[in-house]
Image (spheres, rainbow, N blue to C red):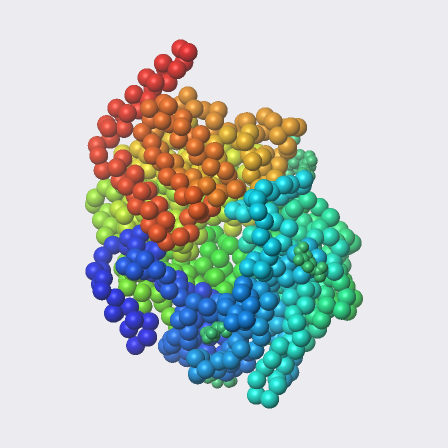
Amino acid sequence: MKSLYVCQLLFPLLVLGKFTPEDLLSAPRRGEAVPNRSGSHAVFHLSSYSFDTHSPSSSWNLLNLHNGDTTVLFSDPTVQEMVWLDDESLLYINGTNSDTKGGSELWIARRSRPGEGYKAASLPAYVSNLKTVSPSEKSVSFVVSALAYPNGTIYNSESAPKKLDTGLIYESLFVRHWDAYDKPEKSSLFSGVLSLDGDKFRLEKEIKNLVAGADGTIETPIAPFGGADDFDISPDGQTVAFVSKTPYLNPANHTQVLVYIVPFDGSSKPEPINLEGKDTSGDPLPKGAASFPKFSPNGDALAYLQMYINGYESDQNIVFVYRMDSSSITALWKPWDRSPGGLLWSGDGNTIYLTAESYGRVRVFEAHIDDDTPKEITAEGNIAAMHLLPSGDFLISRNSLTSSIGYFAFNPSSKRFKTLLLPTDVDLQLADLSKITVEDFSFDGAETKVHGFIVKPSDFDSSKKTRLAFLIHGGPQGAWTDSWSTRWNPVLFAEAGYITVAVNPTGSTGYGQAFTDAIQNQWGGLPYIDLAKSMEHLESTEEYNYIDFGKAVALGASYGGYMINYIQGMPLGKKFQALVCHDGSFASQNIYSTDELYFPQHEFNGTLWDDPENYSKWSPSAHIKNWGTPQFVIHNALDFRLPISEGLSVFHILQSLGIPSKFLTFPDENHWVLKPENGLVWHREVLEWINRWTEVRANRRTAKTAKAQTALKAQDKL
Ligand SMILES: *[C@@H]1O[C@H](CO)[C@@H](O)[C@H](O)[C@H]1NC(C)=O
Ligand SMILES: *[C@@H]1O[C@H](CO)[C@@H](O)[C@H](O)[C@H]1NC(C)=O
Ligand SMILES: *[C@@H]1O[C@H](CO)[C@@H](O)[C@H](O)[C@H]1NC(C)=O
Ligand SMILES: *[C@@H]1O[C@H](CO)[C@@H](O)[C@H](O)[C@H]1NC(C)=O
Ligand SMILES: *[C@@H]1O[C@H](CO)[C@@H](O)[C@H](O)[C@H]1NC(C)=O
Ligand SMILES: *[C@@H]1O[C@H](CO)[C@@H](O)[C@H](O)[C@H]1NC(C)=O
């Protein structure tokens, strides 16, 4: 029996029932499983939250790759990241420091006696994104990221001089990004060597900032979402490759990212490899965002992903390979119409395994260096992480609409997954999810076939009519996939008693680049037609007679929230008894209050001053006269992508027009609600709102809407 299961059986609340928001938010969240060299064991992180004690817990665990057994290594939250040092020992970041306030430490422990580890290094600040290579048994070369002052000195928030005022002054962009005001301290990479001294590893000399000498301001990993995939160490420990936005261009107005190479010991400054020039076929090098630098197993080559267009964050990723000896760059599999998000070299360096979204799933593709097109090798669920095992199998961390991340051994020849750990077997909160049916469906959209998912409640009965929850995704270049999420989880809505429909309209990713690109200058155009046609398709197809179209609600966040505000004034909105808009945009002319200016300039194909009609054309604010559907507006104060004034404007107008409406804000949340207690309130309030308008008879809405219409008419006369 698995140890985790034993732990959970001790929990007092054993009532098995429908999947609730508490279940979603308290269920264990597992990270990727990382195997040791021999492939016998893997480590993974697990975190969870208890609504009984109102406290989080987390642990590091060992997974036996032969039988799936798990054992707890650490349940101490100071253990923040962990990597295998050799087959038996683990190196971890200890987030405390016994000598320096605001510092951290590196510790080494044997996996068989995790509690008996020792301190190998004391670091002067908080560090993260630990990566290592071991060129010999006697030394470990590591790289970590940490904040640094513009002069390269590591930044310790505890010892930094305190300011007496809070003013922040800007003469260039960014002012703020995602959920933080821009500060002069940026993320940098630091390298260090641990050497064997007797029977213990010790830090040789102080860690060294590798990026400080570069021309211009370097930030790596790239905020706000960059991590350990933004850099790599060559297998011989001599070279570090990393990505950073190009220092020659304003980061708020451009997406161009350069790939840099620097000696591990920092003996010379980092140099970009892809600033300008041509690839081996004679084409100019791309100018868009680059990511995922990964050295080949023998260190001869560096693979990375890059987009061509500067200023477009959702352009197609192309795989490039840089040869260390000749500095040549080759573009691979260019005609392949998928945009990979991750890559993994095979042991012999002749194949690259790519992960890419395709028809609603993140799949693995096998791509031989000499082949024209990558071949799909996995079709199920959503691949969150993959590692090669010495046996030739992959250790896969995979989730789906009906399961959080589980672990599998995948055999690429038989294409079979062997289950090592399945959350629905071990997590009580997820026990009933195997009864849920997920269906793919497609219909004729505005210009082409469009794909979506239908998720049915576990107690679905086709002879009864069931309410409808219609979900609209954000991005807009994103997609509903067969994957797990603790925000906007379609299964949660299904288990609350709704047939949950999630459509991927024009602009969605995973259906070819042309489909993604086609949303430019079309925000309320093609995607709106696709969404309207999806409803017409469901209404007119006998198979879906089980849907109660008189009790239907639509919900969306970000671009999905924009679409909610847009359909509020459009015929599609009239099909719903209630709407929910989370952090959506309202007046497209206000969009320069966002953080990344390249985003609206690409989406609306011009600037607000040169092409103002492109912005006004699709603005929800242009159609207020048609509003009438009850709407719940949620907008968070730390959302710097779409400031709270967008949500406040919508709510103030709804209230002024007498349209039933509710407003929720979290002063401490950004574009997303991340804290479990806040997430619980979010879910309770959303379910309360949609239940309120679908449990009562439909004429209640008609009455309120009539009142709203009267209010509008009265206004007309002013
Ligand atoms: C891989 O790690 C496990 C757990 O530490 C260990 O039992 C096994 O021996 C390791 N493999 C080798 C080849 O040492
Ligand atoms: C973390 O570091 C502190 C300070 O050195 C030490 O007291 C503690 O035991 C360490 N914990 C672990 C799990 O390494
Ligand atoms: C770097 O800048 C910080 C902040 O201004 C300062 O405290 C530190 O002394 C500087 N370090 C060096 C080596 O100049
Ligand atoms: C951003 O790009 C636009 C379009 O090229 C340009 O007009 C504008 O001046 C740029 N803004 C900044 C802050 O560089
Ligand atoms: C408008 O879009 C076209 C096609 O994507 C592109 O070539 C052009 O540069 C864009 N213009 C502006 C001002 O964004
Ligand atoms: C939008 O911008 C493009 C490129 O500048 C222009 O051709 C087009 O006419 C503009 N207006 C509308 C309403 O699409």
Residue drawn at x 59%, y 67% as measured from the top left: 124
x then y, percent, for residue 292: 61, 60
Q: x and y percent of residue 99 in the render? A: 54, 71
Residue found at the very far bottom of the displayed protein:
198
When asked about the image quadrant of residue 237, the answer is: bottom right
In the rendered view, does 660 fall on the left or right side of 279?
Answer: left
The answer, for residue 397, to whether it is visible in the render is no
In screen coordinates, is 509 left or right of 69? right
Up the image or down, 493 lies above or below 585; here it is below
Which quarter of the frame holds ligand 4?
top right
Q: Position of residue 73 (x, y in %)?
A: 42, 76
- Front position in the image: 436 or 266: 266
User: Total number of numbered labels?
Assistant: 0
- In the image, is residue 285 above or below residue 132? above
Can you tell which quarter of the image residue 350 is in?
A: bottom right
Instruction: Say which residue appears at 40% left-offset and 23% top-offset.
Output: 626
* Residue 698 drawn at (x, y percent): 24, 31
